[in-house]
Image (cartoon, helix red, strand yellow):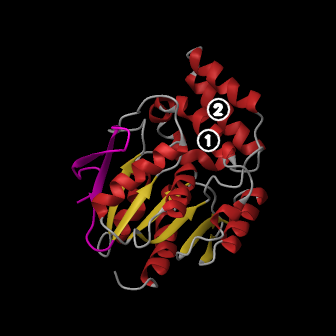
């Protein structure tokens, strides 16, 4: 069964918000969190390649797809609650997987997890350690454009800010550009996630006591600042390792899922039996 036809399941987060996910595959559980401009479908190409060995729980983060948005204000803490709600369904000892802002949620969830709740965490260019890279006035500009109904301009401004900050290479975000309506529909979420990532600051030492096997995926073609942050995070994590995705950038899980699936598989297969 492909992710697109897997039935939608829902759970309620701590604040009552409905969080949707789809299951794909059989085996030890992997709970996947997509990035800022994604949905449950974002990790599907990778999950489909590993579905013979692992059961993926592909989450629609709040405000996307079949999930509710919850009440304002948005916070990363609420998204941690969302992840834990799905982890409860997946069962103890799941692996948590996250990309970009979803990677920040995954890292915070892992940091706060109870012993035995997670077997490992894997993140792909997570939005941690990036505080101060984007001026608040620039983030406010995204909100202004949304209020004016200029969702396309808001999206472009957001991507331009991320490019200027050295976090993504705008030209390599082309896979998403093939789905303009889907991107425009979630452009309003860009500013709130930039603010939440900024609030985490730059100090990665918050993860220095995370005693879990941890994989940091990074594209060798991503900007130098992004690569350095991923290297710093992998060094900070006691059980951390980094896997480079050759000649790829921030959206390799959709642009080159075979490569990402191979790197993730190597990490998962080295974990103790679950």
Q: Position of residue 146 (x, y in %)?
A: 58, 21
- The quarter holding residue 50 reads bottom left
Looking at the image, residue 187 sits to the left or right of residue 2; the answer is right
- The stretch drawn in magenta includes residue 235: no
Extreme residue in the top direction: 148
* 203 left or right of 40 in image: right
- Residue lying at 57% horizontally and 49% vertically, measured from the top left: 101
Please name which of the two marks, 2 or 1, marks the residue nearer to the observer: 1
Checking the image for residue 196, the label placed there is 1
Q: Quadrant of the N terminus?
A: bottom left
* Residue 175 seen anywhere in this rendered image of the structure: yes
SS for dot 1: helix
Q: Which residue is mark 2?
A: 156
Inspect this view and state whether residue 220 appears: no
Residue drawn at point x = 42 percent, y = 40 percent? 62
- What's drawn in magenta, residue-wise? 1-28
């Amino acid at each position: 069964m492909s992710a697109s036809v897997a039935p939608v399941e829902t759970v309620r987060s701590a604040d009552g918000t409905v969080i949707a996910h789809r299951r794909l595959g059989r085996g030890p559980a992997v709970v996947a969190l997509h990035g800022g401009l994604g949905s449950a479908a974002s990790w599907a190409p990778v999950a489909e390649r590993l579905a013979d060995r692992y059961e993926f729980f592909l989450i629609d983060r709040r405000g996307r797809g079949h999930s509710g948005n919850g009440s304002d204000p948005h916070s990363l803490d609420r998204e941690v609650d969302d992840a834990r709600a799905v982890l409860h369904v997946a069962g103890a000892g799941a692996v948590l997987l996250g990309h970009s802002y979803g990677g920040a949620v995954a890292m915070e969830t892992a940091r706060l997890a109870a012993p035995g709740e997670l077997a490992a965490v894997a993140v792909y260019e997570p939005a941690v350690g990036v505080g101060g890279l984007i001026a608040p006035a620039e983030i406010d500009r995204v909100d202004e454009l949304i209020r004016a109904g200029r969702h396309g301009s808001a999206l472009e401004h957001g991507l331009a800010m991320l490019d200027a900050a050295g976090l993504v290479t705008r030209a390599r975000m082309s896979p998403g550009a093939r789905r303009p309506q889907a991107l425009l529909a979630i452009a309003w979420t860009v500013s709130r996630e930039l603010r939440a990532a900024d609030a985490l600051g730059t100090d990665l030492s918050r993860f220095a006591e995370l005693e879990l096997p941890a994989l940091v995926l990074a594209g060798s073609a991503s900007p130098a600042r992004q690569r350095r942050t991923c290297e710093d995070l992998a060094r900070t994590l006691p059980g951390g390792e980094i896997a480079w995705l050759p000649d790829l950038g921030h959206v390799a899980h959709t642009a080159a899922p075979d490569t990402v699936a191979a790197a993730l598989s190597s990490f998962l297969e080295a974990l103790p039996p679950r």
